[in-house]
Image: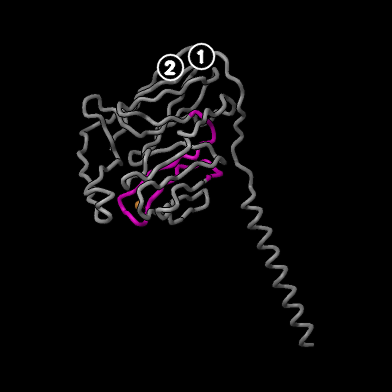
Amino acid sequence: MRHIIESMLLTGVIMLATLFFTLTSTIAKEPNDTNYAPVEVKNGGTVSGVIKFGGEIPALAEIEVTKDTKVCGKAKPDQSLVVDAKRRGIKNVVAYLKDIESGKKWALDEGSLKMDQKGCVFTPHILVVPTGTPFAMLNNDGILHNVHTRSEINEEINKAQPKFLKKMKLTFEKPEFVKVTCDVHNWMNAWIVAAPNPYYRVTDEQGKFELTDVPAGSYTLEIWHETLGKQIKQVEVKAGETVSLEFTLTK
Ligand SMILES: [Cu+2]
């Protein structure tokens, strides 16, 4: 009798374990949920724009460095809001076509798929990468860093990157704006934008962006900033023409 109960219990445990494994592996194997279809775009249009800051431009204090000052220096700029004082343009805003289903192929090179930890600053501050495509996280600082992603849709990454590990390959399978931090140096942070299509651009120092080779049609253009939030505008793109947009973000 005891044997029978034991074997029934064991069978139950095995069945539960199998069910759990099947469920979790199904989740892990879920395909990339983007339906974007790359095609050759002939005579596309351009969406260009500028994003300006409305209101009084805040002066952000530098962040004090408390560790590894030989490599990191004594202070680091706060990159959470970078505004050009003259023209009011906001740097590091991401502008993108939200609902585009078909358009140009990604144009990728070595330089576009890497983020460096340089002088204890993630560089660039915002990196756009295609979903499902590996990119490199570099560490040429000669000290220990740590890559800790605050992802919610993608699996969280929390990996030490010692000085001998100069390059780590990372991949995000699903579209998400992922905050990256370093647990060793609390001032270090950046964003990796896992993008479902190549119509994503980060604004320059003047707050400008340009999306090229957009097939004619109407789209939703969204902008995102790490502290100022999001805004959307509808945009009508005509073949061979440029549409210009202006946005204002405020605190
Ligand atoms: Cu670090």
Along the viewing direction, whichever of 224 and 25 lies nearer the viewer:
25
Please, is residue 111 above or below residue 30 in the view?
above
Q: Is residue 132 left or right of residue 183?
A: right
CA–CA distance in space, label 1 to label 2: 8 Å
- Label 1: state its secondary structure: loop
Where does residue 44 sit, x and y in percent of width and height?
53, 16
CB under 8 Å between discs 1 and 2: yes
Query: What residue is drawn where x is 51% and y is 46%?
Result: 169
- Magenta range is 171-199
Query: What residue is drawn where x is 37% and y is 55%?
Result: 144
How many residues crowd mark 1 within 10 Å: few (<14), some (14–19), many (20+)?
A: some
Q: Which mark is residue 178?
A: none
Q: Is residue 202 left or right of residue 64?
A: right
Q: Which mark is residue 238?
A: 1
The quadrant in which residue 124 appears is top left
Say whether residue 175 is magenta. Answer: yes
List the residue tagged with mark 2.
Answer: 243
Where does residue 47 sit, x and y in percent of width and height?
44, 20
Say whether residue 173 is magenta. Answer: yes
Query: What residue is drawn where x is 59% and y is 37%?
Result: 34
